[in-house]
């Protein structure tokens, strides 16, 4: 059995247990321990200079414990090359139908000379209907995005921080990516780009 199939098997068991038992924290704690050797570790964020990547984006965040079950967002990215700042406003999308749900979360960070940035969202709530990892379980996390603005149509990077509820889980090794949306684009059929690897493979 491959590392990914083993991880998915553990995830299925955890999800079934959470759905059928009130001991959500205990079962997720056990899943965190069992899945630790199976998690994927991404490479660093590639960046070769700042670009004005301002626009609307379809964003996917892939947690290391379940890389093929990303959490989806619609986001508005604002890049100010003069002030050297980046701001990202995001709202979660439901697993079914990609409908906006929950509150808008916002982070502002400095834009480095090489185009990289760090966005600290702080405590964030992922509504139960937007949770693809543990369906129908609301999650709270202290989340930070590291990224790059080297392209005007895509962004990507790493996710760090800590899931705090329903159990503590480090986010190290997680990734994110975003695809710019043009007027008339249908977000419900937009391709999911949840890492810099996926972004690099996307036709420009």
Image (cartoon, rainbow, N blue to C red):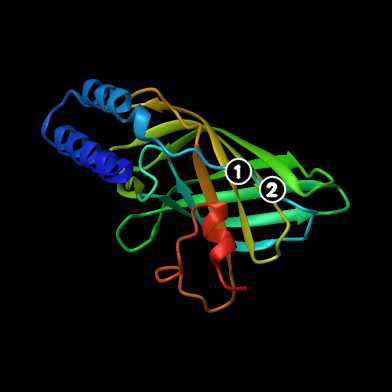
Q: With respect to residue 52, does 133 lie above or below?
A: above
The quadrant of the rendering that contains the C terminus is bottom right
Q: Which mark is residue 106?
A: 1
Q: Residue at x 78, y 53 (%)?
A: 48
Snapshot quadrant of residue 34: top left
- The Cα atoms of the two marked residues, 1 and 2, are separated by 7 Å
Q: Position of residue 43 (x, y in %)?
A: 58, 42
What residue occupies the far left of the structure in this picture? Answer: 20
Q: Residue at x 46, y 74 (%)?
A: 186
Q: Position of residue 101 (x, y in %)?
A: 40, 52
Sequence-wise first label, 1 or 2: 2
Looking at the picture, tell me which residue is in the foreground, 91 or 7: 7
Left or right of 152? Residue 191 is left
Left or right of 132? Residue 170 is right
What residue occupies the far bottom of the structure in this picture? Answer: 184
Q: Mark 2 — residue?
A: 87
Left or right of 41? Residue 155 is right
What residue occupies the far right of the structure in this picture? Answer: 82
Q: Are the residues at dot 1 and dot 2 in contact (C-beta closer than 8 Å)?
A: yes
Left or right of 64? Residue 200 is right
Quick one: SS at disc 2?
strand
Count the marks.
2
Snapshot quadrant of residue 81: bottom right
Quick one: SS at disc 1?
strand
Q: Is residue 58 visible?
A: no
Looking at the picture, tell me which residue is in the foreground, 25 or 201: 201
Q: Is residue 168 visible?
A: yes
Q: Residue at x 78, y 59 (%)?
A: 51
Q: With respect to residue 63, does 36 lie above or below?
A: above
Q: Position of residue 121 (x, y in %)?
A: 58, 36
Q: With respect to residue 201, does 44 lie above or below?
A: above
Q: Position of residue 200 (x, y in %)?
A: 59, 61
């Amino acid at each position: 059995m491959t590392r990914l199939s083993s991880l998915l098997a553990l995830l299925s068991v955890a999800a079934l247990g959470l759905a059928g038992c009130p001991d959500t924290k205990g079962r997720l704690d056990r899943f965190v321990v069992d899945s630790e050797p199976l998690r994927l570790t991404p490479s660093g964020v590639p960046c070769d200079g700042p670009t004005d990547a301002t626009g609307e984006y379809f964003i996917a965040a892939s947690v290391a414990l379940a890389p093929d079950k990303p959490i989806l967002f619609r986001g508005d990215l604002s890049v100010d090359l003069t002030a050297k700042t980046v701001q990202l406003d995001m709202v979660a999308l439901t697993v079914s139908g990609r409908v906006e749900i929950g509150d808008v979360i916002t982070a502002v960070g400095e834009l480095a000379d090489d185009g990289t940035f760090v966005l600290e969202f702080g405590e964030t709530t992922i509504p139960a209907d937007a949770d693809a990892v543990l369906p129908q379980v609301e999650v709270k996390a202290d989340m930070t995005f590291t990224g790059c603005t080297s392209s005007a149509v895509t962004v990507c990077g790493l996710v760090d921080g800590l899931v705090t509820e329903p159990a503590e889980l480090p986010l190290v090794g997680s990734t994110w990516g975003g695809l710019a949306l043009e007027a008339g684009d249908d977000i419900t059929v937009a391709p999911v780009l949840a890492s810099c690897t996926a972004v690099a493979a996307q036709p420009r």
